[in-house]
Image (spheres, helix red, strand yellow):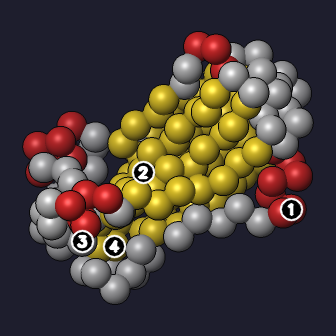
Amino acid sequence: MLHHHDSTKKQIIGRKFLSAERLNSHEIRIICEDGSFDVGVQGDCCSSSVFYDLIVPEKCVGEEILDVFGKYDDSYNKIIREPILSEEEVHKMGWPDSKYGFDSASIWDVILKTKSGEILLRHANDSNGYYDGDTYYRFN
């Protein structure tokens, strides 16, 4: 589940994006002209979450963040009805062994929108099918 409350968005919108760096498999630091903030993911009961990709288009560097929002990607489940990620891909991401066989994997994007494009923080959640992950923010 993604949480983008107005109070969180107000602290992000209007900041000038400079760079992003992975702190570990569960947190990404966003560095802005006036400081930084961390975006993290965590699994609820009976699930685990990890960031598996960070896409920062060069044209977004130095741009003002206009919006932050989340998007759930369930297209793989509707189309092919099989896990989106192989166990090998998951191990490369540093995700611990699956307790749930990756058959209930879900993909979420945290999107930072600029006038020149979008910065994508992609994360996946593996669960028993009843639970999902959570996105949180820490302002430094």
Sequence-wise, which precedes: disc 1 or disc 3?
Answer: 1
Residue furthest to the front: 79
Would residue 60 be found to the left or right of residue 44 on screen?
Answer: right
Sequence-wise, which precedes: disc 2 or disc 3?
Answer: 3
Residue 92: where, in percent of width, then height? 21, 37
Above/below status of 136 relative to 38: below
Give SS at disc 1: helix
Sequence-wise, which precedes: disc 1 or disc 4?
Answer: 1
The residue at which mark 2 appears reads as 123
Amino acid type, label 4 = Ser
Cα separation between marks 3 and 4:
9 Å
Q: Nearer the viewer, residue 37 or 113?
A: 113
Report the residue at 81% width, 54% height from top: 9
Cα separation between marks 2 and 1:
22 Å
Number of numbered discs: 4
Q: Nearer the viewer, residue 40 or 15?
A: 15
Residue 35: where, in percent of width, then height? 82, 30
Question: Which is in the foreground here, disc 3 or disc 4?
Answer: 3
Amino acid type, label 1 = Ser
The residue at which mark 4 appears reads as 47
Question: Could you classify mark 3 by the number of other residues whose Cα lies within 10 Å: few (under 14), some (14-19), or many (20 or more)?
Answer: some
The residue at which mark 1 appears reads as 7
Give SS at disc 2: strand
Amino acid type, label 3 = Ser
Which disc, if any, is residue 104? 3
